[in-house]
Amino acid sequence: MARVLAIESSCDETAAAVVDGLRVRSNVVASQIEIHAQFGGVVPELASRHHLDAITSVIRAAIEQAGLEPTRLGQQLDALAVTDSPGLVGALLVGVQAARGLALATGLPLHGVHHMQGHLFSAFIGDDRRDPEPFAPHLALLVSGGHTELVHVRGFGDYEILGATRDDAAGEAFDKVGKLLGLSYPGGPIIDKLAAAGNPSAVAFPRAMINSNDLDFSFAGLKTAVAVHLEREGQPNSRAQLEDLCASFQAAVVDVLVAKTCTARRARGCDRVHLVGGVAANAGLRARFEQVAASEGFRLVAAPLRYCGDNAAMIAAAAAAQVEAGWTARVDVQSSLAIDEVGQEPEAAVT
Ligand code: KG4
Ligand code: ZN
């Protein structure tokens, strides 16, 4: 079992963690949400600067909380890891440079990890509160702020994208609708809470592409439908109206995500479905998937809430699997790289 220290800085969380294989020994996350909330979204330049401010103390905390000695990392760890794709390039570079410094100081191999492969591992990792899940093939619904993908995980490093969003990601739709409703950034968790008390049938929003013959998604039209509704009816003038609007919007997103996932599962004969990524924290989505799993008889693994959002424990666990599978230690920073390209040898690798 490989012991790995990983760094994650692809977007707006500065994170570091130590794992023994799939077991988390420490997991430290410094969120920049308050900084970006003032601007209604992530400002890349500010993200890089704040990663730079936070990264040393976050790494030090992860080392200490794992009970490791900063001066003996070369003996106490098997490898280092860092998210190298996809993400904001300036933000990625901060984590990569810190990781390279550590690699130089310790002599440890440094593995680049694809952020989405990290999210896949969030469903497998364990800690004091939950035993690790042994890695197994499955269908993953990967829903985050930048991605909405159905991925058939046939084995470790063997990923097939069955469908993806053609425009906005699910999390992006939540955040944009949050903005339209005057909620603070990110809108996803706030809409989730408001929706819990609302009537999902109050407003009939479109379920885009729910009957299309493919496994793709589209959420831009739904956001426009909410904007048109607000133009026509005005902003909700009571808490109850706001809750109804949030519940109706969320139901439209959940319906499409559940329907497409079930179609993909049946088509591929997968007996387990994983929910991962920031939007996998959504209570309405988790509840609907639990119902469907019970009625259709498949195993559902939703990533624990503490690992849905960006963190380095999932990156470290993915790296430990890379080490155990004998992957070459290399780092290749790319702002966009599809998950089905992971595991292939990039031509212009920089180590
Ligand atoms: O995976 P993540 O932390 O970062 C990316 O890799 O993008 O996902 C962040 C996204 C944001 O769009 C946020 O609004 C959304 O996840 N999110 C939620 C919830 N919690 C976070 N969306 C819906 N319901 C939630 N409870
Ligand atoms: Zn993410």
Image: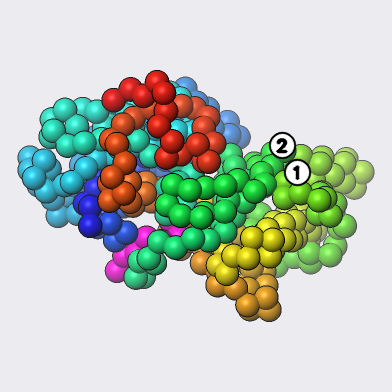
In the image, 329 versus 209, the foreground residue is 329
Number of other residues with Cα within 10 Å of mark 1, as a class: few under 14, some 14 to 19, many 20 or more:
many
Q: Quadrant of residue 223?
A: top right
Q: Residue furthest right?
A: 232
Determine if the magenta segment contains residue 127: yes
In the image, 121 versus 29, the foreground residue is 121
Q: Which mark is residue 218?
A: 1
Instruction: Identify the residue at image location x=52%, y=47%.
Output: 159
Q: Is residue 29 visible?
A: no
Q: Quadrant of residue 121?
A: bottom left
- The Cα atoms of the two marked residues, 2 and 1, are separated by 6 Å
Instruction: Identify the residue at image location x=40%, y=21%.
Output: 348
Task: Specify whether 49 is left or right of 257.
Answer: left
Task: Specify whether 98 is left or right of 11.
Answer: left
**Where's residue 144, x and y in %?**
57, 46
Instruction: Identify the residue at image location x=52%, y=54%.
Output: 153
Which quadrant does the N terminus fall into?
bottom left
Q: Which residues are magenta?
A: 122-129
Determine if the magenta segment contains residue 105: no
Q: Which mark is residue 316?
A: none
Task: Specify whether 305 is left or right of 214.
Answer: left
**Where's residue 179, x and y in %?**
69, 40
Find disc 2 in the rendering and name its residue. 167
Q: Are marks 2 and 1 in contact (CB under 8 Å)?
A: yes
In the image, 269 versus 174, the foreground residue is 269
* Label 1 CB-ligand 1 distance < 8 A: no
State the predominant SS element of the stretch in magenta: loop
Specify how the rendered protein is coloured: rainbow
Number of other residues with Cα within 10 Å of mark 2, as a class: few under 14, some 14 to 19, many 20 or more:
some
